[in-house]
Image (cartoon, grey):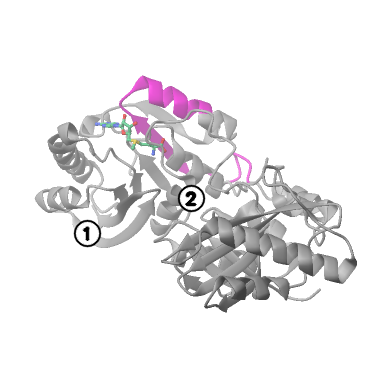
Amino acid sequence: MKRLQFFATTVMGLEDIAAKEIENLIGAKPFQDVGRVIFDGEVSDIYLLNLKARTINKFFIQLCYSRFEKLDDIYKLSKRLDYEWIINSDQTFAVRTQRIGVHDFTSMDVSRVVGQAIIDSYMAATGRRLKVNLDNPDIEIYCLVRDNEFLIGVNTTGPSLHKRYYRIYNHPAALKPTIASAMLKIGGWPSTNSLIDPMCGGATIPIEAALESSNIPPGKCRNDFSFLKLKICSREEFENLRSEMLLGELKQSEKSFSIYAMEKFAKHIQGGIENAKKAEVYERICFQKGDATCAEDYPNVDFDLIVVNPPYGLRTSLKEGVSKLYELFLHAIRVRFPGATLVLITAASKRFKEAAEKAGLTVMNERKVWHGELLTSIFTCKV
Ligand SMILES: C[S@@+](CC[C@H](N)C(=O)[O-])C[C@H]1O[C@@H](n2cnc3c(N)ncnc32)[C@H](O)[C@@H]1O
């Protein structure tokens, strides 16, 4: 089978971590772009990456990347492509477009023009007319128009991988699991032994930590992967690989990691426990109610890693409170865990830096990351 060109989308600011993860999983050396990485691989990589990747949103087979000047160029570029090896004649398709920059056409225009080019190309090759289904297509074609660049690919994932199956309790300020996983990688997990998230909310960070250290693939329970409908993919090969991977899960007794989750509010702790049970990692996490600003409330364990997503205090009334919270929290961990590594995400980066200075903490790195619409910083500090 020929080598395929892929691209994967990720959170803006995490491209290097996503590239490293892909390299570790399949040995490719991805090229980094904004919010995506580009690499090549084989059909079987589609199964493996979709099952195992923790920091990626979606994987696409890249069909074309080119510069263009006008909308008609997009039609011509798309019409030139072969779709027969991807789509069966009885399957439906839809084109979704993301457009960035100033153009004299809309993203709907791009979707319409590319849709027509696909129908025309398929008709010329096979004599069969493909059907469009915008609501529930078998095959989803993705187009990116960014200034004068045009990219077209086939979605192999379906709904984004950041939607983990275990999220049954939705914390109002939940962290994206892809970002939680990246923060853990930044902190060196799972090569460190003991970890605490002292403001755990719905427990995204501890659950991702437990999944990673137990070698449980995040795609373990998913059955809505788009690649299952792609002509070049085989459900049987995929299921064989998934069964093999599940044999690689570490059982509780095989290797022990200490993962602790602490939270001030009983309602969130309970939600976190429900999520952990759904993810089948409840036994691997110690949950306890406690206040992260009180040194005495922490468990009696020498943590070497603290990974946390504290409140950002975005509402005006909470801004002062958040500075105090950061100061007291940093003071508490300085007292209890000197020498540990802290990885923390916040949108209140100035307030965090001031609090870190007051507490005498060394900020080793600040990385800008888009958490949805919000520009946040992931700080790595020596406690
Ligand atoms: C941004 S949320 C964490 C969300 C979590 N990462 C998730 O994905 O569900 C921050 C959490 O910190 C908790 N919190 C605030 N102050 C705290 C304190 N002093 N001690 C412990 N938890 C605290 C809040 O109740 C809230 O659940």
Image quarter where ligand 1 lies:
top left
Looking at the image, can residue 20 be seen? no
Q: Nearer the viewer, residue 91 or 8?
A: 91
- Where in the figure is residue 197, as x and y percent of width and height? 36, 40
Residue 143 lies, with reference to residue 161, above or below; the image says: below
Residue at which label 2 appears: 178
Q: Secondary structure at mark 2?
A: helix
What amino acid type is highlighted by mark number 1? Val
- Where in the figure is residue 296, as x and y percent of width and height? 23, 30
What amino acid type is highlighted by mark number 2? Thr
Residue at which label 1 appears: 363
Mark toward the viewer: 2 or 1: 2
Q: Secondary structure at mark 1?
A: strand
- Where in the figure is residue 96, as x and y percent of width and height? 60, 55
Determine the image quadrant of residue 370: bottom left
Residue extent of the magenta highlight: 250-274
Residue at the extreme top of the image, as rendered: 266
- Where in the figure is residue 123, as x and y percent of width and height? 84, 65
Residue 359 lies, with reference to residue 47, above or below; the image says: above
How much space separates mark 2 and mark 1, taking CA atoms?
23 Å
Q: Residue at x 68, y 56 (%)?
A: 156
Q: Nearer the viewer, residue 22 or 39?
A: 39
Contact between labelled residues 1 and 2, with CB atoms less than 8 Å apart: no
Q: Is residue 149 magenta?
A: no
Q: Which mark is residue 127?
A: none
Determine the image quadrant of residue 227: bottom right
Left or right: where 160 falls relative to 170: right
